[in-house]
Image: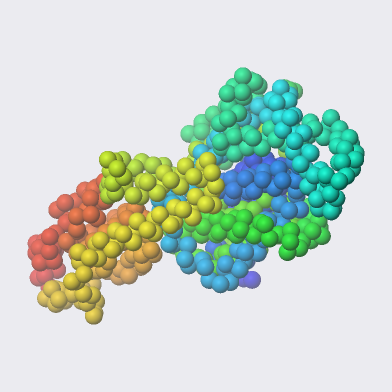
């Protein structure tokens, strides 16, 4: 308990700052998901508190994130559409899926899956994250210009014939389930059809219109019509929000620009009594448990959604553990991946029981927490409590926030979540496969496939396909390289044959690192341990690369990260026998010559030793 409060002041400031940053994002993600701002707030409150309390990353701030919201949005839309467009009817099923996802995460942590997350290749992650950004941008275009397909009377009218067909099919389906033979009892069918009202047809038409324009592809289809129906006030509110978010960052980063934009634009809209569209009303009072989840909880009801829940669990695990790695790099600590999954699972499970959307470790909020002084789990718990206090005290005020403001906030989130590092690398990566007359980079191809499939088809299947393609291409490359170097045998000890004559008086000043085998997404964790192996007395590091025939994009960026870390410590790095493919990769992103000059790359170990003798003369005279 003493350690828990050992950094109370820093944790309090970090948690409060992170909670303030989370507020507008929680509201925006809730609206984007389709369940409303309250669901976003509930998710942020419970996941932040319980994931911090039970998790394995001390400084992590959790809550709804862009990837989790994007997948949740698809899940929610599909379940609502399958329940006659009735959110109330669909809600127990939706929350059951979210509860299952949390329980699956707990299970993944208990069986020790956390340590395997590092095997996901960089191009798959890059394509997925960029797709998330594209999906958010496309789906927020319509609300940012004030166009809502369900409210477009002329558009909804076009779906009435289809709506009547759907309603009739539902009547026939109900009769089949009840054992009524339709062809023998037309009167029953006619009787039920006669009870259909104009309102029923209108409601089904609106559901079909919303379904047709949902997702990234639906938004593109609706865009031409939306342009003709722009609500200029909504557009101005969205643009004003975006302008303040980016503009205020140039003034100061100490105050969250999203919060400033939310307060300023909402204040102007409300203060001048503008005729804008506000978000859904946020209820006052302590959140209630959604007991309807348990009343309908049965194997038959949940079976169709098990795979969907597992997908959310895996995505949340990946999202959280990637943020945990970033937190480790900033705090120089080591998170516990399996414990983190258990904590995230508990947080998501409890959030679902109270009606919140699922979430994961949030990178921006975690970074803000660390920079503000957060060091222990208390910071994340304080962030959750702060959001609860804000909701209880300012719920009626928050209900007046313009919907266009949250759309503007989400547009900036979509722009920020895309992987620009991976996109910039596209022209420079080696073209190692040939499809017909075209030469392509296998890693770029994987990234683009995942990006397109995620955006326009299915996020889950896209990642699965990307993993399979990455594995197949990697196996082919390693197979080809192994065939060429199969005569090389591994040494039985850490000292290579030509290192026996290396001066003993330099053993503390010069550290020699061997790299055996390819540096790829599956071996990056071991290579990252390099910085921890180096003794404090070392001034020079020799990295022997003669047995590293291949380096993929994940390995490339890990190498860059380590070299930057060594440079900050003023440690000189020398390469020995850098082979063709790794050198080509390093030259594409300027590791060579920006971080390692060509004068520090040696053909053999003997030349490297001669350079050391020439440049560290004083040490040899001792």
Question: Toward the viewer: 251 or 118?
Answer: 118
The image shows residue 613, relative to residue 426, as above or below, that is: below
Q: Is residue 180 left or right of residue 115?
A: right
- Residue 69: tell me if it is visible: no
Whole-percent x and y of residue 586?
26, 51
Residue displayed at 62% across by 55% down: 308
Q: In the image shown, does 190 or 217 lie closer to the viewer?
A: 190
* The image quarter in which residue 449 lies: top left
What is the x, y in percent for residue 160?
A: 74, 29
Specify the quadrant of the image occupied by residue 536.
bottom left
The quarter in which the C terminus is drawn is bottom left
Q: From the viewer's perspective, tell me whether residue 343 is left or right of residue 120.
A: right
The residue at 70%/35% (across/down) is: 208
Q: Can residue 621 be seen in this view?
A: yes
Q: Which residue lies furthest to the bottom in this view?
A: 492
Considering every residue shown, the one lying at the far front of the view is 184
Q: Whole-percent x and y of residue 73?
A: 63, 45
The residue shown at (71%, 52%) is 94
């Amino acid at each position: 308990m003493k350690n828990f409060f050992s950094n109370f002041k820093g944790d309090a400031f970090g948690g409060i700052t992170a909670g303030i940053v989370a507020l507008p994002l929680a509201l925006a993600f809730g609206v984007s998901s389709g369940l409303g701002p309250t669901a976003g707030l509930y998710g942020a409150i419970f996941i932040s508190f319980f994931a911090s309390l039970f998790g394995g990353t001390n400084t992590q701030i959790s809550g709804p994130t862009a990837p989790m919201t994007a997948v949740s949005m698809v899940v929610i839309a599909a379940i609502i559409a399958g329940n006659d467009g009735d959110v109330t009817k669909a809600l127990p099923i939706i929350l059951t899926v979210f509860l299952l996802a949390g329980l699956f995460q707990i299970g993944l942590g208990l069986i020790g899956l956390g340590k395997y997350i590092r095997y996901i290749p960089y191009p798959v992650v890059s394509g997925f994250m960029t797709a998330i950004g594209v999906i958010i941008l496309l789906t927020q275009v319509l609300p940012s210009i004030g166009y809502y397909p369900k409210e477009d009377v002329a558009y909804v009218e076009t779906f009435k014939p289809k709506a009547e067909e759907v309603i009739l099919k539902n009547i026939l389906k109900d009769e089949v389930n009840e054992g009524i033979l339709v062809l023998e009892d037309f009167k029953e069918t006619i009787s039920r059809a006669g009870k259909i009202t104009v309102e029923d047809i209108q409601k089904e038409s609106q559901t079909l219109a919303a379904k047709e324009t949902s997702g990234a592809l639906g938004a593109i289809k609706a865009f031409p019509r939306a342009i003709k129906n722009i609500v200029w006030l909504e557009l101005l509110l969205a643009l004003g929000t975006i302008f303040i978010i980016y503009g205020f960052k140039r003034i100061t980063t100490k105050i969250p620009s999203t919060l400033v934009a939310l307060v300023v634009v909402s204040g102007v809209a409300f203060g001048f009594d503008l005729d804008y569209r506000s978000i859904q009303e946020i209820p006052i009072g302590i959140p209630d448990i959604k007991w309807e989840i348990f009343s309908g909880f049965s194997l038959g009801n949940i079976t169709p959604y098990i795979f969907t829940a597992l997908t959310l669990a895996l995505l949340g695990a990946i999202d959280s553990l990637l943020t945990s790695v970033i937190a480790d790099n900033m705090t120089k600590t080591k998170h516990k991946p399996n414990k983190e999954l258990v904590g995230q699972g508990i947080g998501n499970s409890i959030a679902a029981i109270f009606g919140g959307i699922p979430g994961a470790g949030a990178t921006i909020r975690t970074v803000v927490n660390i920079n503000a002084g957060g060091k222990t789990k208390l910071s994340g718990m304080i962030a959750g409590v702060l959001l609860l206090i804000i909701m209880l005290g300012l719920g009626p005020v928050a209900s007046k926030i313009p919907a266009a403001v949250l759309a503007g906030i989400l547009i900036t989130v979509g722009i920020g979540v895309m992987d620009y590092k991976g996109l910039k690398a596209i022209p420079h990566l080696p073209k190692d496969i040939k499809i017909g007359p075209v030469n392509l980079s296998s890693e770029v191809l994987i990234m683009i496939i995942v990006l397109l499939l995620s955006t326009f088809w299915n996020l889950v299947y896209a990642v699965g396909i990307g993993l399979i393609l990455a594995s197949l291409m990697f196996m082919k490359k390693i197979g080809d390289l192994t065939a060429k170097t199969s005569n090389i045998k591994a040494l039985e000890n850490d000292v290579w044959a030509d290192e026996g004559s290396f001066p003993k008086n330099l053993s503390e000043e010069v550290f020699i690192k061997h790299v055996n085998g390819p540096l790829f997404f599956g071996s990056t964790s071991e290579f990252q341990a390099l910085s921890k192996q180096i003794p404090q007395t070392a001034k020079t590091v020799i990295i022997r690369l003669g047995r590293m025939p291949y380096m993929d994009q994940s390995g490339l960026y890990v190498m860059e990260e380590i070299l930057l870390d060594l440079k900050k410590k003023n440690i000189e790095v020398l390469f020995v026998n850098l082979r063709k493919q790794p050198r080509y990769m390093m030259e594409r992103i300027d590791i060579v010559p920006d971080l390692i000059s060509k004068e520090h790359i040696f053909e053999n170990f003997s030349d490297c030793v001669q350079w050391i003798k020439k440049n560290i003369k004083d040490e040899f005279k001792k």
